[in-house]
Amino acid sequence: MATTRLIPLHIGKGQTVKGAITRTIDYIEDPEKTDGGRLVTGFECDPRTADAEFLLSKRQYLMQTGRDQGDQDVIAYHIRQSFLPGEVTPEQANEIGQALALRFTKGKHAFIVATHIDKAHIHNHIIFNSTALDCKRKFRNFLGSAFALRRVSDRICLEHGLSIVKNPKPSRSSYADWLGEGRPLSFQEKLRHAIDEVLEKQPDDFETFLAEMKAHGYEVRRRKLLSFRAPGQEKFTRCRATTLGAEYTEAAIRARLTSRGSVPPRRAGGALPIQESNPKLYIDIQAKLQAGKGPGYERWAKIFNLRQAAQTLRYLQERNMSYDDLTAQTEAVKAKFNTISDRMKKLEAELKDNATMQKHIVTYAKTRATYIAYRKAGYSKQFRATNETNILLHQAAKKHFDALGLTKLPTVKSLRATYAERLEEKKNAYREYRQARDEMRELLIIQENVDRLLNVPQHKSQRGRDESSL
């Protein structure tokens, strides 16, 4: 299971933007915490120069928009993602962190993922630039963004076969509190759980939400501030940020109802407006009931599945697709995605090798004089003890060149030019990658929904149907 927390990073008094960014990035990229930097990855930025790239994007944003918030500006956002001890490997945690950052920012912001292994529980630190890649807008820290982050993290954990926190506590709590260790829950924590549980059912509107809260045994009081009181509780608990957190105010609850796809109110004509959205994955209701979901969830899930069945059918009818057409197109898109993914990995490997070569060439040049002096001194042990760091670096660089069979070293200028070309190729490839990934996800969801509706056995791609269309 993974817990998450979203933290806005401000400049702060007496600091510069560059200083604030550099200090934070240096902390999360600490080699002692990230296996010598092996567990640090970047998206649309090089982790080694991310502070400079973030700063450049902010200057371009200021030039294009003229907006300057001074000391109150949010320069970046920090996500902490912690995993249950022993449940993931460092490599898997880093992969999950990248997926979380990509989905949460929708691929519109550069970010760094650093996986720390210095604690009993593996955890990720993710820093993403508040300024978008196009330098025209910034990330909007909306009401309930921490809640949305947790939901995205939970979905990714389920996709990787990991457990999730069934009764999540507020994201500002400690890791032990999330796991429910050490003390009984307070009335405030129980109220947060009840609100989350009711919102999970996606009530039609705010009045239905209040009715569900009453069904959970809570007394509702609606004055200036919405308040609830549990059985056995002496005083009402007010829904305000200082008491329950920003995600549990009345305004935040209403926003969460809207963002979670609640049923829109009826119009004057009595008909419900059609919601245009991509089909979502069909729910296995029996499996959910066995996992502990109640009758309320079952009612909601049946309605949800009917809507998704209608969405799936409409998707196929609009495109005039038969089952065989759907299967063929899905396989074609998967093949395209895998091809682009392989090309991305090849480009990333070339970028990594290029950066390593640049580093060794610069090191070789800086330590060359020292190594010549060492050789002239007859490889003196005393000289080596005094200059051991430079000698070892020089030897490591020479060993790298020999392993590649190089007789003549390329210039750093040519390597930088090649690096820029490969980086541009990677950016262009990533646009194709995102498009293919989104198309593949949509088709896989449609395919699985159709298979469920037609009771097609899993892992069976062809049934030899006589039907020409659905």
Image (tube, rainbow, N blue to C red):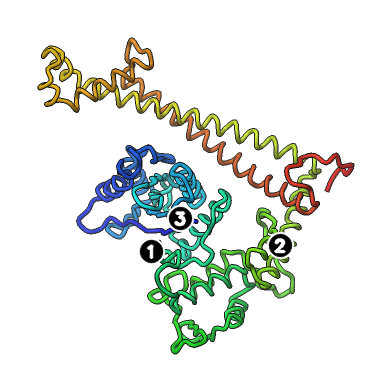
Q: Amino acid at mark 2?
A: Gln
Residue under circle 1?
174
Which is more N-terminal, label 2 or label 1?
1
- Between 243 and 32, the one lying in front of the other is 32
Crowding at mark 2 (Cα within 10 Å: few <14, some 14-19, many 20+): few
Crowding at mark 1 (Cα within 10 Å: few <14, some 14-19, many 20+): few
* Left or right, residue 75 beside residue 249: left
Q: In front of the other: label 3 or label 1?
A: 3
**Answer yes or no: do the residues labelled 3 and 1 have beta carbons within 8 Å?**
no
Q: Position of residue 311 (x, y in %)?
A: 73, 56
Within the image, what quadrant is residue 302 found in?
A: bottom right
Element assignment for label 3: loop
Residue shown at the point (70%, 56%) measured from the top left = 282
Residue under circle 3?
84
* Left or right, residue 372 beside residue 470: left
Q: Position of residue 300 (x, y in %)?
A: 68, 68
Q: Amino acid at mark 3?
A: Leu
Which is more N-terminal, label 2 or label 3?
3
- Could you tell me how far apart the alpha carbons at marks 1 and 2 are, in whole angstroms? 34 Å
Q: Position of residue 381 (x, y in %)?
A: 13, 20
- Could you tell me how far apart the alpha carbons at marks 3 and 1 are, in whole angstroms? 13 Å
Residue under circle 2?
286
